[in-house]
Image (cartoon, coloured by chain):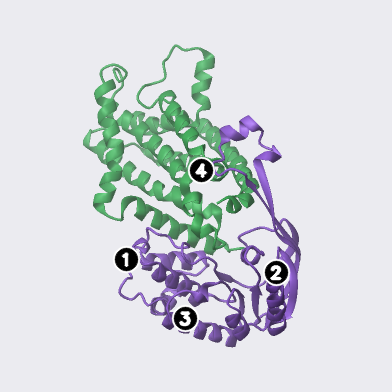
Amino acid sequence: MIKLSQVSKKFIIPSRNSFTLFRALSSGINNPAMYKTIHALDKVDLCINRGETLGIIGPNGSGKSTLLRIIAGIYKPTSGVFQVEGVIASVLQTKISLFQDLSVKENIFLFGAILGLSRKEIHKNYDKIIDLAGLSEFTNAEVRVLSGGMRERLSFAISVETAKDILLLDEVVLVGDSKFREKCLKIIMKFKKEQKTLILASHDLEIVNEFCDNTLLLNKGKVFSFGKTKEVINSYLELVKT
Amino acid sequence: MKISNRKYINLVRELTFFNFKLRDQGSVLGFIWTLLHPFLMLTILYMLFSKRLGRGIEHYEIYLLIGIIQWNFLSTATNEGLKSIISSRSVLRNVNISRTAIVLGSVLGVFISFLLELLVLGGFIVFSGLGYSPAILFLPFVILIQLVLVVSISLVLACLNVYFKDTGHIWNILLKIGFFTTPIFYSIPMFISKAKMTAYFLNPMTQLIIFMRQIILSKTSPPLINMLFVFSAVLIVLAVCYLIFKKLEDGIIERL
């Protein structure tokens, strides 16, 4: 189960890219002019039960990825509380979330360890990952030499095949060719059947409509609408029109 | 995501293994490249200083090598630790992975090289006819103290490097100053003021290098009270650095 209560997220980031200790000391470390504040999420309440598939939709910059990162435990909320029961696997940004200097095989083992799996468990899933990613001929190749599509497939395959309880996906089912997309959708169906929790943030309303029981519509960091997927999609289409 | 000790150890082990492999390209030739640096330093410093600063120091080549290897570990491991979080940026932004494990993995990757360099030093000792004494049993304790010190510094540097882009430059300047103010290629002069002597001994690397030289060259165990004092000081440094790391940790992912 995943429960968020009044969760807000505010980013305070340096207003300049190159932020040095010298500059901080010369302008004062706590000088507000040195930072800008971005309110990414504002008092979000959400409850997702085990086995549920939730879609998250909303315009660009509405807070979808931030919400997924909070659920994944990557970001800490500025205020509010959240509770997650179960092990989370996430595919949030497939293009770059691999260790570029390591081989395909090494990435699988390292990511397995990151997700809390033992070597034995990774060995058990190894063939399935390679098969899903379609990289059986590239197991010893460094990730940096793979094409963008190959990297995306590998990143997705590692997370999906090792996910135990909860899987967070951010736009990823749209990656790859039609064959890979078909494989992904089959896996998502299997995931649903096994009563695992799936949260999918996407702009693809067709996929959200097909797979998600409930959907959350975010707009400017706030919950605009939450409920049955069809109704929420209609709200979104109206929101986009205005 | 809270992870159990077993999973954490498993993660650190995997990260250590891959970091070591990446540094040394997982090959014998790669390791030779890594060894080349301390031995090149040894050759240069020996040629420059053996006649002057090394006069009166027995087995000056071993004396020098001990200092170089220990300093090299501090310098390389803290630099790897410093870069560790930034270079794992893409992974950290997308997966909930322990940040301490990332830093530990990169420091321990260098630690393996350090141990291998010590093995080569062992070969030198045999070759030079110096031999060993039971005092060698204290060596693991000295190595442990240095490892704790290096991990502590790396934790803070890794975080600061995310907040301030010039951390690496500042740290490398400090390392350069440290190299010349630590008795690596010279011995501490006998007749200096008390203040200068205190300054030498406030530097934990001075103490650690002296301990190792005492064990290997003098074949005597360093005074236990001194070792325990340095160990306690290093544990306090670790506690302070860990608290700083925890304080800064939450903000680092947002700045990556």
Q: Nearer the viewer, mark 3 or mark 4?
A: 3
Q: CA distance from mark 1 to mark 4?
A: 31 Å
Earlier in the chain: of badge 2 and badge 1, it is 1
Percent x, y for residue B125? 27, 36
Using the rendered image of the protein, determine whether residue B146 is visible from the camera's viewpoint: yes
Q: State which chain is coloured purple.
A: A
Q: State which chain is coloured green.
A: B
Read off the residue under disc 4: B154
Percent x, y for residue A149? 41, 71
Q: Nearer the viewer, mark 1 or mark 3?
A: 3
Q: Are marks 3 and 4 in contact (CB under 8 Å)?
A: no
Within 10 Å of the Cα at label 3, are there few (<14), some (14-19), or many (20+) other Cα atoms? some
A27 or A102: nearer the viewer: A27
Q: CA distance from mark 2 to mark 1?
A: 40 Å
The amino acid on which the numbered mark 1 sits, given as a three-letter code, is Ala
Read off the residue under disc 3: A181
Circle 4 SS class: helix
Read off the residue under disc 1: A141
A224 or B154: nearer the viewer: A224
Using the rendered image of the protein, determine whether residue A195 is visible from the camera's viewpoint: no
